[in-house]
Image (spheres, helix red, strand yellow):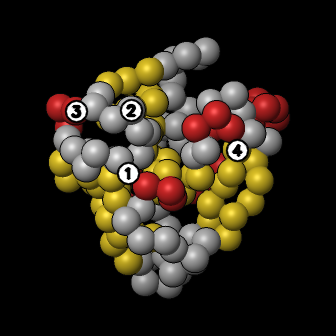
Amino acid sequence: MSALVWKTGGCHCGRVRFEVALPPRPEAHSCNCSMCSKVGFIHLIVPESRFRQTAGQGDLTEYTFNSGVARHLFCRICGVKSFYRPRSNPDGWSVNARCLDEAVDMDLTAFDGQNWEANAAGLAHLSREAAP
């Protein structure tokens, strides 16, 4: 794997901030599920070790639905979901590429979240640590 680069991002009002380590051209997904299609979330799923929240821990509010496994986290001030703990990858984080401070080149693939049960296993590898 190519060297990872730490990128910064956050919500609209700037209270919630994060850093994420990404390869030069990360794999990203545009999902058509009922949640992602409404909020325009572009998924950059990373392992736990490649994500850190740097500000606004007390400014997050949580929303869960359906199975209750995914932890959808929103800034309680501006309402933006910059990142969340996905049901498909409960050992990692999904960062919204649209919330990065600078645009990144990415390989964007459509993900059929409307048929989540049939397709979710295809995302599991994204939150696994790469072998050294």
Q: Amino acid at mark 4?
A: Cys
Q: What element does badge 3 sit on?
A: helix
Q: Amino acid at mark 1?
A: Glu
Spatial distance from mark 4 to mark 3, Cα to Cα?
Answer: 26 Å
| Residue 59 numbered mark, or none | 3
Q: Nearer the viewer, mark 2 or mark 3?
A: 2
Spatial distance from mark 1 to mark 4, Cα to Cα?
Answer: 21 Å
Q: Residue at x 43, y 39 (%)?
A: 81
Residue indicated by mark 2: 79
Q: Amino acid at mark 2?
A: Gly
Q: Residue at x 51, y 23 (%)?
A: 69
From the top left corner, tell me how far across and down residue 12 is, in percent: 35, 47
The local crowd at label 2, few if under 14, some if 14 to 19, many if 20 or more residues have their Cα within 10 Å, is some
| Residue 48 numbered mark, or none | 1
Q: Earlier in the sequence, mark 2 or mark 1?
A: 1
From the top left corner, tell me how far across and down residue 27 is, in percent: 62, 66
Among all residues in the image, which is located at the extreme bottom? Answer: 2
Q: Is residue 9 above or below residue 39?
A: below
Q: Earlier in the sequence, mark 1 or mark 3?
A: 1
Residue indicated by mark 4: 31
The local crowd at label 3, few if under 14, some if 14 to 19, many if 20 or more residues have their Cα within 10 Å, is some
Q: Residue at x 41, y 77 (%)?
A: 4
